[in-house]
Image (tube, rainbow, N blue to C red):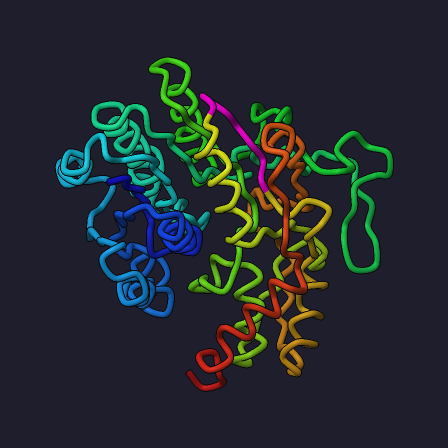
Amino acid sequence: MSVAVVTGSAGLIGSQAVRHFARLGLDVIGIDNDMRSRFFGSEASTAWNVERLSVDLGKAYVHHDVDIRDRDALAAVFRKYGRDIAVVIHTAAQPSHDWAARDPLLDFDINAGGTLNVLQNVREHCIDAPLIHCSTNKVYGDRPNSLPLVEQETRWEITPGHRYGAGISEDMSIDGCLHSVFGASKVAADIMVQEYGRYFGLRTACFRGGTLTGPGHSATELHGFLAYVMRCAMERRTYKLIGYKGKQVRDAIHSHDVVTAFEAFFHNPRSAEVYNLGGGRYSNASNLEAIALAEKISGNEMRVEHVETPRTGDHIWWISSNARFEQHYPEWQLTYDVPLIMNEIYEANVDRWVPGR
């Protein structure tokens, strides 16, 4: 029996990983306690996804309602499957800047402490299993805001000819900048994953994603950029356009493209690797551009509230360079761009996201 353990298994990337690795023939063990509903309220609950995974995958998926902070409960899961565990995909996290600032202890316990718990269990029970960690581009803090940017009609862009013109690479420094409390906890987790690779010889990779998206997102105001834009358009909610004139740019990568990158690493793992992973120049949009696209797809004019003061540490421009990962795994490629992503989000939620709900 070959087992894939997926933490945060009911979330966007976690649930996509569950389905993907089940299709590869692995038995999937999911670990998720629906903390998202505590962070963002009942509308952001992932309980619906647990039910759907269980129905769709049957015996191929076993769910454990376990908190990654609970060392004893987590160890019991890893101990049960032991050397049968072929890969561990760690997506569980506290994902919100706002939440982290309100409760730094909870944020650090989940993001840093929870990650350490997962790492130690891999070391003790399945040391040969590759450990895939969902990190974030927020480990770079607000360093990207020091890049030379030019204001255009609908977006900010980097100065032509800059060495990051094709996207920001992993050589960007994480030092001497503002990270936010969330970013700091994710830095701690990221470094610990690397250290378990270098010091203990685990086969680990940190995937530093930006806007990870897709139809499986339980979109809410504080998390899930493209899905929440589309939800506001469909439900006629007011969307808050916060800072930088709405021209801040994000690259967006579909959950399918994320987990195919995970699969590539699973088949040919390395140790202590770090990869920026995003839509790159292939798939990116500013807030204004995403709003215009949501209006076109939904047929609804959006209600937009402009907020001049930006979120602390928010990136003005972020486009990832996938060059390092593509060098190591040349068979992998992006398949979704922003219009395709947003159309799919619309089609997947057309019966759920309606005015008045």
Q: Tell me if 27 is positioned left or right of 287 in this view.
A: left
Percent of width and height locating residue 68: 25, 41
Could you say where residue 200 lies in the image, as x and y percent from the top left? 33, 15
Number of labels in the image equals: 0
Residue found at x 75% / y 33%:
164
The answer to whether 273 is drawn above or below residue 355 in the figure is: above
Residue 185: percent from left, percent from top? 40, 35
Q: Is residue 265 above or below residue 346?
A: above
Location of the N terminus (image quadrant): top left
Which residue occupies the extreme right position in the image? 160
Which quarter of the figure has residue 129?
top left
Note whether 21 is above or below 59 in the view shown. above
* Residue 158 position by quadrant: top right
Of residues 217 and 335, the one drawn nearer to the viewer in this rendering: 335
Viewer-side residue, 198 vs 141: 198
Residue visible at 53% across and 66% down in the picture? 228
Give me the residue at 83% from left, 59% from top: 153
Q: Main secondary structure of the magenta part?
A: strand
- Determine whether, in the image, residue 37 is placed left or right of residue 313: left
Q: Which stretch is magenta? A: 270-277
Residue 130 position (above or below residue 149): above
Please tell me which residue is depicted at 86% across the width and 38% down the height of the picture.
Answer: 160
Q: Position of residue 181 (x, y in %)?
A: 44, 38
- Which residue is the extreme one toward the top? 199
Q: Is residue 297 magenta?
A: no
The C terminus - image quarter = bottom left
- Residue 271 drawn in magenta: yes
